[in-house]
Image (cartoon, helix red, strand yellow):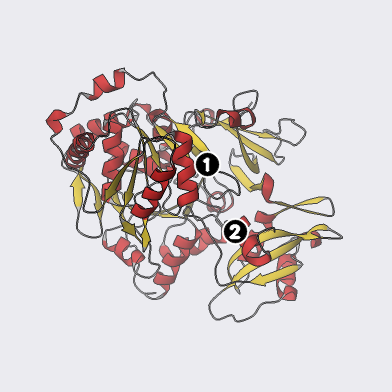
Amino acid sequence: MGTNADARGALMVEQLDLQPTYWELIERRATVSPDRLFVSDDRGRALSIAGFRDAAERAAAGLVAIGIEPGQTVSWQLPTTVDACVLMAALARLNCVQNPIIQILRHNEVGFIVEELGSDWLVTPEVFRNFDYAAMARDVAAQASNPLGLLTVAGGLPDGDRATLPSFRDLRASQAAGETNWIYYSSGSTGRPKGARHTDASVIAGSNGFVSGVGLNENDVFPCAFPITHIGGICFLAGALRTGARMVTFDSFDPLETPRAMARHGATVVGSAVPFFQAYLAVQATQPDTALFPLLRVCAAGGAPTPPEMHYELKNHLGAGIHNGWGLTEFPIATFTCVGDPDEWHAQTVGRPCPHVRVRVVGTDGADHTGDGQIGELRVDGPQKLAGYVDAELDADAFDDQGFFCTGDLGYIDGDGNVHITGRIKDIIIRKAENISAVEVENALYTHPAVADVAVIGVPDRDAGERVCAVVVLAEGHEALGIPSIADHCRAQGLANQKIPEQLEIVDALPRNPAGKIVKHVLKAQLFGEGA
């Protein structure tokens, strides 16, 4: 039996805020507060919620005019801009199945995705960050088995007459309840990307933890510099629609300039992963007597694990610590820490299950360890669970016999109901037949004064099977680091001898995906070759 946040009175959210469809959520917010500023960018463009609704309907009419039909499957790969937000809403208005694609994916991945989906359209920018997306789209279309329409967004979305649109109710009536509306592909895997099928209801439910854990409200301003095509993008937009919060879009992130731009917009909530938080701290250090974010109340994390020490660094230097969450493409924002939780919960855990979410812990022997504090695979069930994979053959291994999604993450639940992440099933180093959590070693090393960033990986070893290798980015002012220093530090942190790194690699930067997660298979390939 899984732990349930409702029974504990934690993370409760008023379910009257929820609507059955994303478009109806937009219409309701536009009715309640039409003139309220909803989304803007750093270049002067801004839309009220009524303006956002109207822009989405004009764009929907423009899409129909170029040949996009209601109900079609549309893959799109725009950067984090106001246009991307409007396109999301326009496709929802047309009751299309939309497939947002992370910006860094290229020919092979995009080609695989549109082929597997049988996409009707692919929407891209023309050129972005010196990459020719339009040329890539043409190549993908030329190789696709089915006709693939192309739309290049250069000067804005197509515009049309809202009056020409069929009613949303009529469009929706043709769709079966619970049918797929959103398809998100996982990134960062060594294998083919996996497409998770979601409904409007599941992505809206993904905003529950953010709304109630962070206490998102109409006074909040959230600068979004992470990819809007990540599943967290639609979850935050749904949260903003439910509460009246405002989003500011940034199509790229400059570690020196973007934090200051966020501050100019009056940021109250910032995110979302280690590289972003490090940038905020670095800029704050250049102006120690003036708060970078004077209105800040929450640093929201969830795209990737954060070292416990970072909570205290952010609280001490920015005035607000981390609110940790945990989720997956298949199950967005399953847990979140809450306003008012003790510091140690924010630093050491990813919080309690979100409303109506159940988490169970299953050992390698198949036994349920939910109530005994033992480590096992974390499995989740709740309203934000994917409907299944695009490749239905993957479903057999994705769900257990109780219908819980098998996350592949290892962890446990403490006596307060908080979930602790200890690693990934595939991120365990097996040294002399003993399992070592890479996350545990990383958290210990992160507190070393010479370490700015760190990843711990297993390296093949003839005698031990695998040895522990620390890959370190040196902190500013430190030019060297050796095994004796990190060994002494690890012992002082209480690590057992077998967990202490036996190999050290110094690098300039760690490869991360757009969500901030270290991509360890890329790191291994960079250090030891493709077959590592």
- Position above or below: 252 against 17: below
Residue type at the position of mark 1: Leu
Residue 385 in the figure: left or right of residue 372? left
Circle 1 sits on which residue? 328
Circle 2 sits on which residue? 522
Crowding near the residue tagged with mark 1, few <14, some 14–19, many ≥20 C-alpha atoms within 10 Å? some
Residue located at (74% from left, 31% from top): 366
The mark nearer the N terminus, 2 or 1, is 1
Judge whether residue 326 can be spotted in this image.
yes
Residues at discs 2 and 1 in contact (Cβ within 8 Å): no
Residue located at (75% from left, 75% from top): 484
- Position above or below: 221 against 444: above
For the C terminus, give its image quadrant.
bottom right
Give percent across and percent down for residue 399: 61, 29
Give percent across and percent down for residue 469: 71, 64
Task: Find the distance from the CA under tag 2 to the CA under tag 1.
Answer: 20 Å
Give percent across and percent down for residue 315: 46, 61
Residue type at the position of mark 2: Val
Report the mark closest to the observer, 2 or 1.
2
Residue 272: image tag: none
Q: Nearer the viewer, residue 417 or 266?
A: 266
For the N terminus, give its image quadrant.
top right
Q: Nearer the viewer, residue 81 or 222?
A: 81
Quarter residue 135 falls in: bottom left
As helix, strand or loop, the secondary structure at mark 2 comes to helix
Judge whether residue 338 can be spotted in this image.
no
How many circles with numbers are drawn on the protein? 2
Residue 526 in the figure: left or right of residue 159? right
Quarter residue 378 falls in: top right
Q: Residue furthest right?
A: 463
Q: Nearer the viewer, residue 116 or 346?
A: 116
